[in-house]
Amino acid sequence: MLDGTTDLKRAIERVARAQSLEELKDSLVESARELFFARAAGVHFLEAGGEDDEAPALLGVPVHLHSQYCCVTRILLKRVFDCHAPVHQRQFFSDLAWTQLPTVGDVRAAAGLYHYLVSPLIRHGAIGGMISTARHYNEQPFGERELSAAAALSAHVTERVSALRWHPHLGEVPGRLTPREGQIVELVVEGLTNAEVGTVLCISENTVKVALKKVFRKLEVSSRTELATRAWSSAKTE
């Protein structure tokens, strides 16, 4: 049911234009509904333990069904944790088994939502959130094209989330950090070695070392400790 690359490109452009996490979430739920011809869509940011970091942004879901909708998407999120890729319910459940799940049945009865697609936001090998969409029970189920588009969209969203969370802290200086430098700084602040940063970002240890030298000059710091102190101090003053 996708219209090819045009809708995906438009969704990715909206992601890139977002200037805050709230703006990103609001525009993303709209883009997800349009891109996947979905009746409902949600964006959730998660903590390391898998709990909601903040309230999810939901569109097309009646207020009285918000908790039930989140419960349904979490059923699929458990599968996402195993494969770290977008999933839809037909990959794991027969129609009969899916319908018999109490929460699924409740949401279908109240709002007609039945076909679900959940795509993870993967950060440093861990799931930091998800994008969810749902279609009416009498509409076409999600398939391989939607899974592919969801994976592409999630990759861009993850990159933008990282930029919005860190560049406001470290980017407002002469010689603004590049997106790659921002990624490296984030990992260094979390305590990773140059070798570990290189592994996560699929670049060489020497490339990390060269990039850090540039970052030190731009931010006028001389050590990793100073870099971490500046990052956390800036975050606290936001």
Image: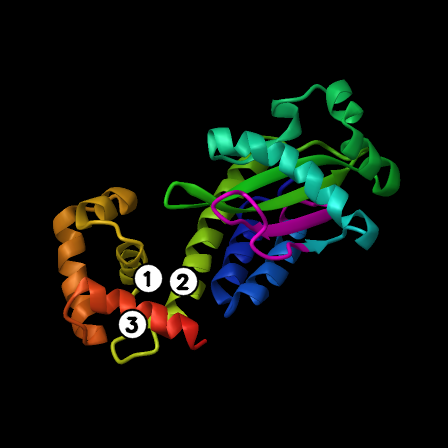
SS at badge 1 = helix
Comparing marks 2 and 3, which lies closer to the viewer?
Answer: 3
Which quarter of the image is occupied by the C terminus? Answer: bottom left
Q: Main secondary structure of the magenta part?
A: loop
Q: Is residue 153 magenta?
A: no
Residue extending farthest to the bottom is 174
Cβ–Cβ under 8 Å for marks 1 and 3? no
Q: Please indicate whether residue 141 sits to the left or right of residue 163 in the image.
A: right
Q: Residue at x 80, y 47 (%)?
A: 65
Q: Residue at x 18, y 54 (%)?
A: 208
> Can you tell which mark lies on residue 179?
1
- The crowding category of the residue bearing disc 2, from other C-alpha atoms within 10 Å (few below 14, some 14 to 19, many at least 20), is many
What is the magenta range? 35-57
> Can you tell which mark lies on residue 60?
none
Could you tell me how far apart the alpha carbons at marks 1 and 3 are, in whole angstroms?
A: 18 Å
Q: Please indicate whether residue 121 sits to the left or right of residue 87 in the image.
A: left
Residue 10 visible to the viewer = yes
Question: Measured from the top left, where is residue 27 in percent x and y?
Answer: 61, 61
What amino acid is labelled 1 in the image?
Pro
SS at badge 2 = helix
Question: Measured from the top left, where is residue 39 in percent x and y?
Answer: 75, 46
> Can you tell which mark lies on residue 163?
2
Q: Is residue 53 magenta?
A: yes
Residue extending farthest to the right is 109
